[in-house]
Image (cartoon, grey):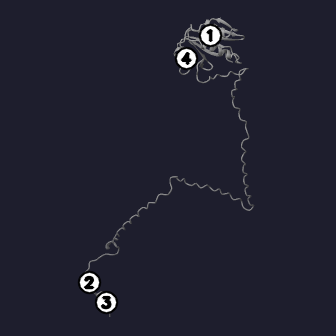
């Protein structure tokens, strides 16, 4: 719940523009049945069981300059910036908004004074200025207790364990053939896997074979004449010098041979 209601900022060009006496006259004329109480730095308007408070500050040089940007386009800002007196106006908390009309009446009466500007903290606009469109005022909360804050989301609950995937059936082992009674069982031959050589993916065809030139025939070696040993090397043989008698003996031998062949 807000501590105050209907907050407004009232600016004046000097302390003599809107004094406490002038403020009390305006309030007494608007609400003759009300009671105005004077206190240090403030004035209080009491309407039966509800009160409006006016806090005075005569040393507010430069404060109005912060609000000059809220003036409508074309409004003169120089006089507002020159204001040195500020009055903080607000009422007691009013959840039912029963005194909104009273607050609007008070600020309208003050905004008509020369040298006074009244700014609404709710609509962010100056009272009695034409902005060309209606002001948007935040609607007060409904009567009753403040709305319960939304619960903060807690940690997400852990997911419940569900049924896991069904186990795959285990194949039953094939029965081994029963050995015959006559011969002992032959051992089973386990085929070894054939390991193929890895083939490079970039190799598509074998490179062409390069035929090597046939070697030239080697030249046949020249025959080596067989060395004949000298006659003197043979055992039992020797040469003797020839004589004239030997020639005659050979001639007689040839004559005898030819006579036998040709009678």
Name the quarter where the C terminus is drawn: bottom left
Q: CA distance from mark 3 to mark 4?
A: 173 Å
Lower sequence index among marks 4 and 2:
4
Please give the name of the residue rendered at 64% of the width and 13% of the height, measured from the top-left corner.
Answer: 106
Determine which of the numbered discs, if any, sits on residue 66 in the image.
4
- Residue position marked by numbered label 1 in the rendering: 55
Lower sequence index among marks 3 and 4:
4
Depth check: 100 or 155 in front? 100
Q: CA distance from mark 1 to mark 4?
A: 19 Å
- Residue position marked by numbered label 2 in the rendering: 247
Q: CA distance from mark 3 to mark 1?
A: 188 Å
Q: Is 258 positioned to the left or the right of 200 in the image?
A: left
- Residue position marked by numbered label 3 in the rendering: 258
- Classed neighbour count for the residue bearing mark 4: other residues with Cα under 10 Å, few (<14), some (14–19), many (≥20): few
Residue 54: in sight, yes or no?
yes
- Mark 3: secondary structure: helix
- Mark 1: secondary structure: strand
Q: In which quarter of the view is residue 146 placed?
A: top right
Q: Give yes or no for contact between labels 3 and 1 (Cβ–Cβ under 8 Å).
A: no
């Amino acid at each position: 719940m807000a501590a105050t209601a209907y907050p407004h900022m009232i600016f004046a060009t000097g302390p003599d523009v809107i004094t406490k006496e002038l403020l009390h006259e305006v309030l007494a004329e608007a609400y003759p049945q009300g009671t105005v109480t004077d206190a240090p730095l403030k004035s209080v308007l009491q309407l039966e069981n509800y009160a409006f408070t006016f806090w005075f500050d005569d040393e507010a040089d430069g404060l109005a300059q912060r609000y000059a940007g809220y003036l409508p386009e074309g409004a003169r800002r120089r006089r507002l910036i020159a204001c040195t007196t500020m009055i903080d106006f607000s009422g007691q908390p009013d959840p039912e908004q029963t005194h909104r009309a009273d607050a609007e009446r008070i600020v309208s009466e003050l905004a008509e004074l020369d040298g006074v500007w009244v700014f609404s903290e709710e609509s962010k606009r100056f009272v009695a200025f034409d902005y060309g469109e209606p002001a948007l005022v935040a609607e007060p909360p409904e009567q009753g207790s403040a709305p319960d804050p939304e619960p903060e989301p807690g940690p997400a609950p852990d997911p419940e364990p569900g049924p896991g995937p069904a186990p795959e059936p285990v194949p039953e082992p094939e029965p081994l053939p029963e050995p015959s009674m006559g011969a002992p069982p032959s051992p089973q031959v386990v085929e070894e896997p054939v390991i193929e050589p890895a083939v490079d993916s970039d190799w598509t065809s074998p490179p062409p074979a390069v035929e090597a030139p046939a070697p030239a025939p080697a030249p046949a070696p020249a025959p080596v004449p067989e060395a004949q040993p000298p006659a003197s090397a043979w055992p039992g043989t020797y040469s003797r010098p020839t004589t004239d008698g030997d020639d005659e003996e050979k001639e007689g031998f040839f004559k005898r041979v030819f006579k036998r062949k040709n009678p």
